[in-house]
Amino acid sequence: MKSHILGIDLGGTKVMAAIFDAEGNIISRARAKTKAWRDDEMVFQTVSRTAEQAMERAGIPLGDLRAVGIGAPGPLDPDTGVIIESANMKLRNFPLGPRLAEAFACPAIIENDVNAGTYGEYLAGAGRGARHILGVFVGTGIGGGIIADGALYHGFSKNAGEIGHIIIKAGGPRCGCGNRGCWEALASRTAMTRDIRKAIRRGDKTRLKEKLKQETDLISGSDLAKAYRAGDKLVVRIMNRAARLLGAGIGSLVNVLSPEVVVLGGGVIEAMGDDFVARIDEAVRDIAFEFMVKDMRVVRAALGDDAGVTGAAMLAREAVERA
């Protein structure tokens, strides 16, 4: 019986693929840059090639997978496998699930990328043992996942958790979704890059100027972290502001959802580390009701890059076992 599961995590800057054995262990990985400004077909080809590379490294021939699970930016329709649209990628009404099922000759399960990451942390990472979890992943955008009483919460539209598009500042910066003042337009890595670029144009000095030669360039989480730790005044100012904004948004969500654990993940959090998480935690507790945060924990994701592929793969395994 086929036992291997392919997990894929598709983000605005990178795609990662991993092969899981019957016990849920990762036996191979592959990754590539997404280059999100490219058209949908080119993005799909990148996803396919990366997945094939992971299969080759694991010695798994085409046609020998039990299922594919992919976490992808939404909104999307998990029943049809169609990405309806994406704020940070040129994907519109794209049948990602059916295309993957055809390419790899097995069932393909599609889930929101941050839902998948949150589910991975719930099963195997920082959220283990908890029943009520809010996942907040800060990268190209800001994504959220909600575990309510031990199950992923999808809501009526099946797309609950789009926390990056709550309005934090009415009339604020334009977001990739088209609205103004969204949380991710103020505190994501895209927003941080935009603010650094603007400050450079005003004449501010920063060691990151060389990283922004083209309009499409995004500063990496690791570069932000290095500049922050080196005391780059501009970067310190922008990152500390981002921590306050992240804390304000999370604190507001805590008052709505009352999670047991808030898991912080994504490239920015991973690169910045525990000190940045502590700043966010402090801001959360300034905003949320005291009785809501009394026994609540704010923790850094434990699985790193593996969170999304793990959650996607486990959701795919569960889906085929139910079928």
Image: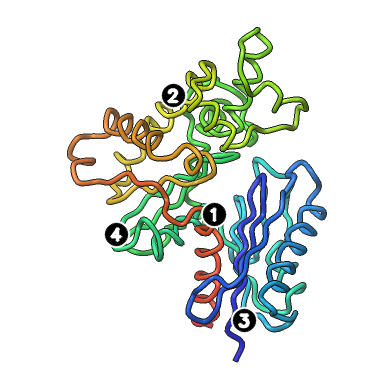
The amino acid type, in three-letter code, at marker 2 is Asn
Judging by the rendered image, the residue that carries numbered circle 3 is 66
Answer with mark 4 or mark 2, whichever residue precedes in sequence.
Answer: 4
* Residue at numbered disc 2: 240
Give the farthest residue toward the bottom: 1
Q: Under tag 3, what secondary structure?
A: loop
- Mark 4 or 3 closer to N-term? 3
- Looking at marks 2 and 3 on the same chain, the residue that comes earlier in the sequence is marked by 3
Classed neighbour count for the residue bearing mark 2: other residues with Cα under 10 Å, few (<14), some (14–19), many (≥20): some
Give the number of the disc on residue 305: 1
Residue ID at (48%, 23%): 169
Using the image, determine if residue 279 lies above or below residue 314.
Answer: above
Q: Position of residue 210 (x, y in %)?
A: 71, 24
Q: Earlier in the sequence, mark 2 or mark 1?
A: 2
Find disc 4 in the rendering and name its residue.
130
Q: Amino acid at mark 1?
A: Asp
